Amino acid sequence: MESRKTIRKWFWVWEFEKEEDWLNEMAMNGWVLENVGWCTYHFVRCEPGEYSVRLEMHPYDESYKAFMEETGAEYAGRMMMWVYFRKKTANGPFDLFSDIDSRISHLDKIGKLLAIIGGANLLIGIMNTFSPSRLGWINLLVATLLMYALGRIHGKKEALEKERLLHE
Amino acid sequence: MAESFALTEATYYILLSLVKPRHGYGIMQLTEELSGGRVRLAAGTLYGALNALSTKRWIIQLPMVDESRRKEYRLTEKGLQVLQNEVARLRELADNGEKILREE
């Protein structure tokens, strides 16, 4: 029986929870994340349910990695701004966020990044529309998509903020 | 310090844990123990909170003593003050709750 496999799969940025669910489903089926690449997930065999997997947008930060390892989690890889961790279920439950505030600030971080890249594309798109290259539409398309993503992230954030009015 | 505000549960237990020097994992363990397993601090939440509390100077990071790379933190004078205010505030909440419910 093979002990490693690679799956190519695409998730939109607002689907990060769905991505995490999928990775945990894989772990339940005996495949735990070993590394990540561009739309690529590398898995290695494990006991079904041996690991739980979490992901988060977090800029490169060596001390965060050390901190996570201190709490019994293992670093599984990084793709762009996203970092992936796994932890043996025998070592206790594994979550990255335990209150609404930190979930909101996570969504904030994602939103800010989308706004910056989206804004840059909008600007370049407008400039290119008036240049002979005629490729401005690509940037405008990217900008539209990123603004849509920003809207989805913002929606998640608003739902959490409503909840926080009543409790932590 | 006349500021009056409610701390989050996470902040409260972090400050309480840091009356004595502790590292991140120690804070998680003590919080879980003190709350009888009710409050579990997740690593990402704790990491963010430790950074925010350091910026506010309610806690400080202690110089690293061993080579384990584990950072230890401790409450500052300011942090202790905030914690004492919060305990007084919580006592008021609990006292009022008990008083009114007893009258019912």
Image: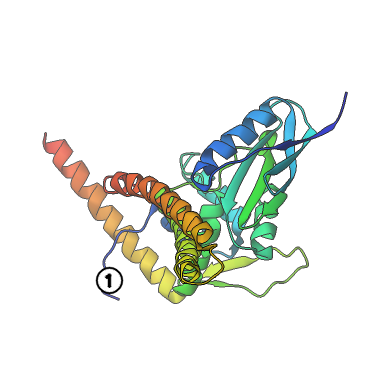
Residue under the point 28% across and 63% down: B5
Name the quadrant containing residue A34.
Answer: top right
Image side of residue B73 versus residue A105, left or right: right
Q: Residue furthest right?
A: A1
Image side of residue A7 versus residue A112, left or right: right
Q: Which quadrant of the figure contains the N terminus of chain A?
A: top right
State which chain disc 1 sits on: B
Circle 1 residue: B3
Q: Is residue B23 above or below residue A37?
A: below
Residue A140, how many percent across, how many down? 47, 59
Q: In front here: A48 or A88? A: A48
Name the quadrant containing residue A47.
Answer: top right
Residue under the point 36% across and 46% down: A155
Q: Is residue A49 above or below residue B8?
A: above
Residue A14, how many percent across, how many down? 48, 45
Residue A102 in view (yes/no): no
Residue A98, how many percent across, how many down? 48, 46
Instruction: Name the residue type under label 1.
Output: Glu
Q: In front here: A144 or B53? A: A144
Q: In front here: B20 or A134? A: A134
Residue B54, how many percent across, how many down? 50, 71
